[in-house]
Amino acid sequence: MELSYILNELAEHREDYFRAVSPPIMQTSNFAFKKVADLRKSFENEYADFLYSRGLNPTVDILRKKLAALDGAEDCLVFNSGAAAIFAAVLANVKSGDHILSVKNPYTWAKKMFEDILPRFQVSHSYIDGTKIENFENAIQPNTTVIYLESPNSWTYELQDLAAVASLAKKHGIITIIDNSYCTPLFQKPILLGIDLVLQSATKYISGHSDTVAGVLSGSGPMMERIFNSEYMNIGSGIQPFNAWLLIRGLRTLEARLERIDRTTKEMIPFLKQHPRIEKVIFPLDPSFPQYDLAKKQMQGACGLLTIQIKAQECATIETFCDSLQHILMAVSWGGHESLIIPKVSGMKPEAFDPVNPEHRMLRLYIGLESADYLINDLSNAFSLIEHLS
Ligand SMILES: *Cc1c(COP(=O)(O)O)cnc(C)c1O
């Protein structure tokens, strides 16, 4: 299916809503029936028809069809956050006594689920360095039911060889789940590489305007139907119609935004790499990246999110640098119109800062829709203000 068709036409039936070009927001909690027999049919299978908006809703359905097509998946469910998509995907595939094999340092709330919630139900986990396939082979236990991946992750961008992990997991009957937030389905399609379940935080590039929190989970038809009938309906964290409409609107410009951000990122990397105050730039599609070849093989692009490691002896120097930026905002998240920065030191006490530890000198930069010159000026000015600081 062509990308232009998915973003502009798929699942839109204008004759059903007064030929409006922009689909309506079906802001309704319930749907009425004329006959008991129809209501009964809907009770029997809520996944087949509109009954109640905690389940299916027509505006959400337009979005679902587009997002599933983007992932190359049979079906998808859209949640009120990426964290909810992670929770449902994992919960649906473990029971008491099972073991989860996860890449180390997964997204914060995946980690909290593995460490704080699932042990209460006798579900164990172990973390591995996912850059080597042998590490997966060696860590699989007889009770492993889920392999949890995040490729690349969103601070240091380590990758897993998705096709290799998928084929290993299939041999052992293990379900593979990947957090694909970094790439979006435009730049990586894990389903086509054999991964079972793909999720992403739609808060990031899909929304694209920093105004919606949402998550997507894609997979096979039977798997999504099973998750709909249990975790999705029970947790009740499906996306609301208005937020679904905002995501449909975000999708219209997804390709255009990513192209623009990709260009700006490519213009900024040479500036960052030559700057005397920057020790290292970490970006999966830069030839200096340790897994550059794998990135080129399984990703069709990467844009916007990268990490710089700056030279600083004091925590205060990093703080002055960030405090001095005039345009790049200091905030969590990414994928919106606005460029962002977040220093690693914001997550630790200043006394704990150790200049010898390169991680402490990392700053994550998200490049948004501003021009490269505008952003380079902002960074240059902030660097000049710390010139005299060690
Ligand atoms: C933001 C994010 C999430 C969580 O998504 P929410 O929409 O914030 O719940 C999950 N994984 C990654 C990599 C993220 O960046």
Image: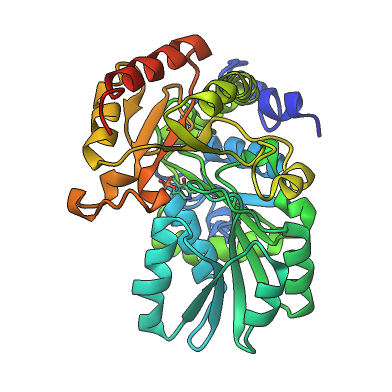
Q: Is residue 182 left or right of residue 382?
A: right
Q: Is residue 122 left or right of residue 144?
A: left
Question: What colour scheme has been applied to the protein in the rendered image?
Answer: rainbow
Q: From the viewer's perspective, is residue 268 above or below residue 350?
A: above
Where is residue 196? Give x, y as percent.
Answer: 69, 62
Where is residue 67? Give x, y as percent.
Answer: 63, 40
Where is residue 81? Give x, y as percent.
Answer: 42, 47
Q: Residue at x 45, y 22 (%)?
A: 337
Along the line of sight, the residue nearer the viewer: 354 or 370: 354
Q: Residue at x 54, y 20 (%)?
A: 271
Q: From the viewer's perspective, is residue 288 above or below residue 277?
A: below
Where is residue 6? Give x, y as percent.
Answer: 71, 30
Q: Answer whether residue 316 is visible to the viewer in this image.
A: yes
Q: Residue at x 69, y 50 (%)?
A: 291
- Quarter of the figure that contains the N terminus: top right
- Quarter of the figure that contains the C terminus: top left
Residue 364 placement: quadrant: top left
Along the line of sight, the residue nearer the viewer: 368 or 250: 368
Q: Answer whether residue 238 is visible to the viewer in this image.
A: no
Q: From the viewer's perspective, is residue 129 above or below residue 248?
A: below
Report the label total. Answer: 0
Q: Is residue 11 left or right of residue 366?
A: right
